[in-house]
């Protein structure tokens, strides 16, 4: 769905990302300064990597070798910022309609009425953003982004500024976007509750690199669990990918895992904690506090 | 009582002042927006020089600005000579008064607009781009409307400054009744003649009234725009 191969230098910080995104919701997870926002800025065209190639579906968004760089406004992406960034001089309705005039021949993703209904913002349409609460603003921002008919939605900690009940309501909105509208979403978050509830795939980043990619099994219920936000899977190492990464087979899927010791053929227990994606070799299994007879 | 003290020359001075101030202000707006935008948002070689040039009339004695205008824009001057060949003459015409007023008011207008542009969060423009707006659309649908309060304030300041401009005007276009005599130069002329204090006083009151109306008007617009944008 989306291929990203980029290298970039920002002062002391270097970005070196080679990753593929699948449809569904992918959570970008990792400490501050891991390069999560830089990665989605590069996808959006806000950051221009020194070297790289970004392909969304069939469309090449960036290819520094061939000198291709599609500007932000032609990338057909939606970007949900932490701060909703509603245009203060327009009403809610005008904000929602902003992207529609740029659709051209593209088909709208949903009608204005449907979007307003999904987000529950019908009573706000004639107001100005200054008269909205934080949660209402973020709903309108999501609606505005959806009405621009994006082929990919980027969300940078969209719920971080909201209180718990508001977060819960908006997570339901993201679930509908993921499941009903089927818009692929790349979602940056620090919050394990959001990641475990929303993500199909978790990509863990650190120091400008992708260090692990974990697919949250659709059969989450069957996977052995030690706690609500920890999932574990038996996995077999198929081959060494780089010095830091091995390729492992988890229930027939291939994943890349950060590990320097494992050799092909080793069995591992892959523990997917939404705060830490880590690997454990067989020797470490005794350290784990739960039984697993897989 | 005021009208009795006003002869045809005084009325001419009032109308001319309004004409000069309106023309100076309106024709400055596009250039001031461009310069303010460039100073606030772009980095380019010679930016400090441009900034200095724009602000020069604010710090120079007005007489010096007027004299420099006369040297450069007069019919014998390098720019004025060229313009005169195609029929555009500034020196000793009302258009020259408008030019002098525009030059003197320009820094005030640019400053107000620039401050407003600097207060606009570029994140709004970024958001507009992610929604599909080209840079031109972003400018006209987001940046420009958010700049409007600054343009209004800058224009009112410039209008007031243009109404009151004296030193550069009288140096550049002299003080010819009915042609280049604005309210301030008329007041000055009356004060040179014994017994004309009444006429000068009448013009002073007119001047105060026009300035007050302009300020009230700007307050009204600023409040309207402010309410619409929710106290931006």
Image (spheres, coloured by chain):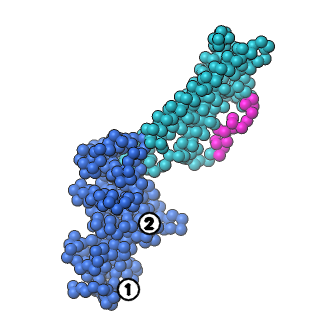
Chain colours: A blue, B cyan
Q: Between residues A145 and A119, which one lies in front from this camera angle? A: A119
Residue A209 sits above or below residue B9 on the image: below
Q: Is residue A100 above or below residue A9?
A: above
Asked if residue A112 shows in the view, the reply is yes
* The magenta stretch spans residue A34: no
What numbered label is drawn on residue A261?
1
**Picture mark count:** 2
Question: Which residue does the image show at 44% across and 66% down from the upper left?
Answer: A35
Residue B30 versus residue B183 in the image, above or below: below
Residue in view at x 24 percent, y 85 percent: A292
The quadrant of the image that shows the C terminus of chain A is bottom left
Which residue was labeled with disc 2?
A: A35
Q: Which quadrant of the figure has residue B58? A: top right
Question: Could you say where residue A218 lies in the image, as x and y percent from the top left?
Answer: 22, 70
The one nearer the camera, A11 or B180, is B180
Q: Residue at x 31, y 90 (%)?
A: A286
Local crowd at mark 2 within 10 Å, few (<14), some, or many (≥20)?
many
- Span highlighted in magenta in the image: B48-64
Residue that protrudes farthest toward the front in the picture: B1
Judge whether residue B49 is colored magenta.
Answer: yes
Residue B115 locus on image (x, y percent): 57, 43
Q: Residue at x 49, y 35 (%)?
A: B223
Task: Give the quadrant of the N terminus of chain A.
Answer: bottom left
- Mark 2: secondary structure: loop
């Amino acid at each position: 769905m989306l291929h990203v191969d980029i290298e970039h230098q920002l002062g002391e910080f270097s970005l070196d990302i080679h990753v593929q995104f699948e449809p569904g919701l992918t959570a970008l997870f990792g400490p501050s300064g891991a390069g999560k926002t830089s990665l989605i800025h590069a996808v959006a065209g806000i950051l221009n990597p020194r070297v790289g190639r970004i392909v969304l579906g069939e469309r090449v968004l960036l290819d520094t070798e061939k000198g291709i760089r599609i500007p932000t406004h032609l990338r057909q992406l939606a970007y949900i910022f932490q701060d909703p960034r509603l245009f203060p001089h327009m009403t809610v309705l005008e904000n929602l309609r902003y992207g529609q005039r740029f659709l051209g021949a593209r088909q709208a993703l949903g009608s204005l009425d449907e979007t307003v209904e999904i987000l529950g913002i019908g009573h706000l349409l004639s107001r100005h953003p200054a008269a909205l609460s934080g949660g209402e603003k973020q709903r309108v921002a999501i609606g505005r982004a959806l009405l621009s008919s994006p082929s990919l939605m980027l969300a940078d900690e969209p719920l971080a500024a909201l209180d718990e009940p508001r977060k819960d309501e908006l997570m339901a909105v993201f679930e509908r976007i993921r499941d009903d509208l089927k818009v692929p979403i790349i979602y940056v978050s620090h919050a394990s509750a959001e990641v475990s509830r929303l993500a199909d795939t978790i990509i863990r980043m650190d120091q400008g690199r992708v260090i692990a990619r974990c697919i949250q099994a659709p059969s989450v219920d069957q996977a052995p669990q030690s706690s609500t936000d920890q999932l574990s899977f038996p996995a077999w190492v198929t081959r060494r990918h780089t010095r830091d990464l091995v390729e492992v087979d988890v229930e027939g899927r291939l994943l890349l895992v950060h590990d320097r010791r494992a050799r092909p053929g080793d069995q591992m227990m892959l523990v997917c904690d939404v705060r830490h994606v880590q690997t454990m070799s067989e020797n470490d299994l005794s350290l784990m506090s739960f039984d697993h007879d897989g | 009582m005021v009208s009795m003290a006003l002869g045809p020359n005084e009325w001419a001075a009032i109308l001319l002042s309004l004409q000069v101030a309106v023309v100076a202000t309106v024709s400055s707006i596009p250039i001031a927006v461009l310069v303010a935008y460039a100073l606030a948002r772009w980095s380019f070689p010679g930016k400090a020089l441009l900034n200095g040039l724009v602000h020069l009339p604010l710090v120079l004695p007005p007489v010096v600005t007027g004299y420099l205008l006369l040297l450069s824009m007069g019919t014998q001057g390098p720019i004025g000579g060229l313009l005169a060949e195609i029929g555009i003459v500034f020196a000793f015409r009302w258009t020259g008064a408008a030019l002098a007023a525009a030059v003197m008011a320009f820094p005030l207008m640019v400053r107000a607009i620039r401050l407003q542009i600097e207060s606009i969060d570029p994140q709004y423009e970024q958001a507009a781009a992610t929604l599909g707006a080209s840079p031109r659309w972003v400018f006209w649908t987001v940046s420009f409307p958010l700049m409007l309060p600054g343009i209004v304030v800058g224009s009112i300041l410039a209008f007031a400054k243009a109404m009151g401009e004296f030193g550069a005007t009288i140096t550049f276009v002299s003080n010819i009744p009915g042609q280049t005599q604005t309210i301030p130069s008329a007041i000055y002329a009356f004060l040179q003649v014994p017994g004309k204090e009444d006429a000068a006083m009448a013009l002073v009151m007119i001047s105060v009234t026009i300035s007050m109306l302009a300020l009230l008007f700007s307050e009204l617009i600023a409040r309207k725009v402010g309410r619409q944008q929710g106290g931006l």
